[in-house]
Image (tube, rainbow, N blue to C red):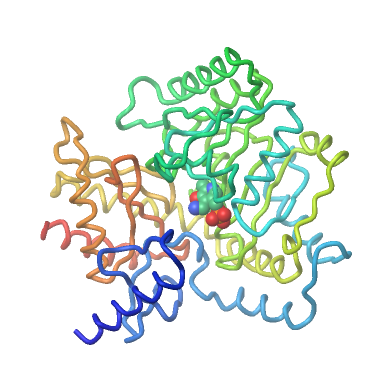
Amino acid sequence: AAGDAAEQAMIARRQRLLGPAYRLFYAHPVHFVRGEGVFLFDAAGTPYLDVYNNVASVGHCRPEVVEAIARQAAILNTHTRYLHEGILDFAERFLAEFPAAIGHLMLTCSGSEANDLALRIARKHTGGQGVIVTRLAYHGVTAQLAELSPSLGPAVEPGPHVRLVPAPDGYRGTGEVGAAFAAGVQAAIDDFRAKGIRPAALLVDTIFSSDGVYADPPGFLAPAVAAIRAAGGVFIADEVQPGFGRTGDALWGFARHGVVPDMATVGKPMGNGHPVAGVVLRPEVVAAFGRDIRYFNTFGGNPVSVAAADAVLSVIQREGLRENARTVGAYLAAGLRRLGDRHPILGDIRGAGLFIGAELVLDRASKAPATAETARIVNGLRERRVLISATGPAANILKIRPPLVFSKANADLFLATLDEVLAAL
Ligand code: PMP
């Protein structure tokens, strides 16, 4: 009870100081003081299994990353208009992880800044304004991106140059996924044309996290990418969530679909918690922008951020974390499907690597969303010290997205706890 009073006081203090726009997770919020590997610890030292946080992809407070940040911070940290070798060495190593057509890297501090820059470049390159995103997309916090982030809710209206298309939903959708998705994109292009708007870009999260996690069948993006290019627009792959090996097949979600984007944006796990993000692109798309516009981002690509990103990339490469995402992800998905044999509420298990969506339904035939039950499961797991979240239009899809260092033993603990929570529903 004393803990509860202290917690209530902290919630009230937060509200008073930070104002009304923030939301806490959980009916009973958590307060962490330390992180290590795949665990977060509360003030009493109790560990919580992290099955949610994709940012700390090489493990919370990963020593190699912490040391790289500390080492560089003690040597030099300054803005990005001086020569520095760190950024060039990193850019070489990083660009080598992309298809050969991708030739430049521009660094920013957040995924939002990366998407914002990519859109400016797309509009300059194409001379168009129109942007196509999915119906429940999230792409960032800037004024421009809020209009392209319908998952923020009806209070944030899509801008006049924005068209929303249905997500590539192979569970509830009808018809072949790739053809259906491309038809939505083509309808958006036709609508732009009818209103005299030139299309600039198709911008999608290549794992469709906020839409509900859609990965299959591999290749479904290709026809939509062809459609936007035929209309004179570019394809921007938002890799902020799927990137850096999470999907298990490759470092980047677009690779799963056999397409090479005109630009890709990266962030979140790039610095394992340190704010570093960026845009990689085909040189030809940035030619006009580079000629006419001076781009300077004070902190984007500073030596300390680059040291963090370099350390993260090294750990992913050295420890084979994309392979770990593939094997542990397949193990986890198989375990969830086995739970589904006993718990009919588990209507669909999908995803790629260590990004899994589990869609909960009241009835497998009607697929009626089990929204209230999903909230109870997320909160029930939290009470049993396991962290996940929910996503999708009816908030009935469990979002299972642990750090990439997740092991089979961690997966077993998660599955056993979820089994208990489902049995107690
Ligand atoms: N794109 C996607 C797909 C995201 O999930 C997010 C963050 N949730 C962003 C962009 C924005 O990144 P940031 O919060 O670093 O600005």
In the rendered structure, the answer to whether residue 53 lies left or right of residue 121 reads: left
The quadrant of the rendering that contains the N terminus is bottom left
Q: What is the quadrant of residue 103 in the picture? A: top right
Residue 153 locus on image (x, y percent): 40, 43
The residue lying toward the viewer, choosing from 328 and 222, is 222
The residue lying toward the viewer, choosing from 95 and 234, is 234
Residue 399 locus on image (x, y percent): 35, 52
In the rendered structure, the answer to whether residue 218 lies left or right of residue 233 reads: left
In the rendered structure, the answer to whether residue 18 lies left or right of residue 306 reads: left
In the rendered structure, the answer to whether residue 349 lies left or right of residue 223 reads: left
The quadrant of the rendering that contains the C terminus is bottom left
Q: Residue furthest left?
A: 424
Q: Residue furthest top?
A: 194
The number of discs equals: 0
- Residue at position x 35%, y 78% in the image: 10
- Residue at position x 26%, y 51% in the image: 336
Q: What is the quadrant of residue 393 in the picture? A: top left
Please, is residue 101 above or below residue 409 in the view?
A: above
Residue 228 locus on image (x, y percent): 61, 23
The residue lying toward the viewer, choosing from 244 and 13, is 13
Please, is residue 401 above or below residue 13 in the view?
A: above
Q: What is the quadrant of residue 382 in the picture? A: bottom left
Camera sees residue 35: yes
Camera sees residue 244: no
- Residue at position x 37%, y 42% in the image: 212
